[in-house]
Amino acid sequence: MIFKYRDFYIYIASLLALSCFFYFSIYFLNTKQLEIINFIDSEIHEEFEIEITKNIHDINNYLKEYLFIESYLLKRKKNQIDIQIKLKKYFALNNYSEEVIFYDNTTAPVHYFKTNYLDSINLIDISKNSIYINNYLSENYNILSSLFNINKIEYIDDRRYNLVLSNGKIIMLPKVIDSKLLYFVKNNIDLIDKNTNYMQFLDLRNFHKKTIRLK
């Protein structure tokens, strides 16, 4: 008889414990505010957004590893968190290395970015390894792109660049891209375009030795 009472008490205690567990679990779920995380005007891939979300409470240290991120802004509104990430200025896309190259020579694998962001990069780097942007190119690329309809770029011999235009013609640049070169091109590009010898390339490699070639 004593054993029967003990089994009964154990049963009742277990039932009460189970009931309490369910009660407090439901109470906790109902009262806990779920954090809603929004990425504003995001250009990064959804999978990368998920990884950032997992590290949201240590976001400063987490994002330090990703050098292509220039800055970020995080705003909290009750149970909602808005994140706006600003990327560095891109320069080109390399399909061989599957990387985005930024103006400061930072590179990042393409899988970090959304397709529409990658599609917005008009310049293709056709170097076997991702291009290195030296000071000459960094300072003067905007002027070059205003003079030529550049479609692709290639880093040659770790010292100079070839530009591939949208019409397939190649501009072979010298190592030193300076104001003299740009002034010459700006003032003679119409004559060069009309030259019947200019079918394949414009060789400016020896420009500073006062020699150019057309083919």
Image (cartoon, rainbow, N blue to C red):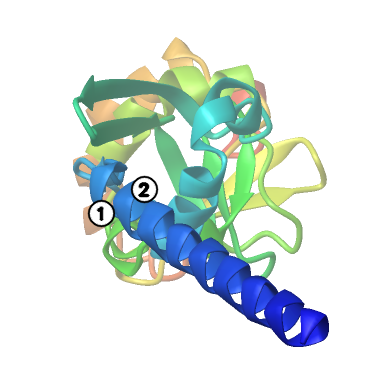
Q: Amino acid at mark 2?
A: Phe
Residue 150 in sight here: no
Dot 2: few (<14), some (14–19), or many (≥20) neighbours within 10 Å? few
Question: Disc 2 versus disc 1: distance between alpha carbons?
Answer: 74 Å
Q: Quadrant of residue 65?
A: top right
Seen in the image, is 11 located left or right of residue 69? right
Tell me the SS state at disc 1: helix
Tell which of 156 and 192 is nearer to you: 156
Residue placed under numbered mark 1 in the picture: 193
Task: Pick the residue in front: 182 or 67.
Answer: 67
Residue 28 appears at what percent x and percent y? Answer: 36, 48
Which residue is found at the position 54% from the left and 52% from the top? 51
Q: Quadrant of residue 135?
A: top right
Quarter of the image for residue 25 reads: bottom left
Residue at the disc numbered 2: 28
* In the image, residue 36 above or below residue 169: above
**Residue 24 in picture, x, y percent from top left:** 41, 52
Amino acid type at circle 1 is Asp
Marks 2/1 in contact by CB < 8 Å: the verdict is no
What's the residue at 69%, 79% (across, down)? Answer: 5
Horizontal side of 211 relative to 215 (left or right) equals right
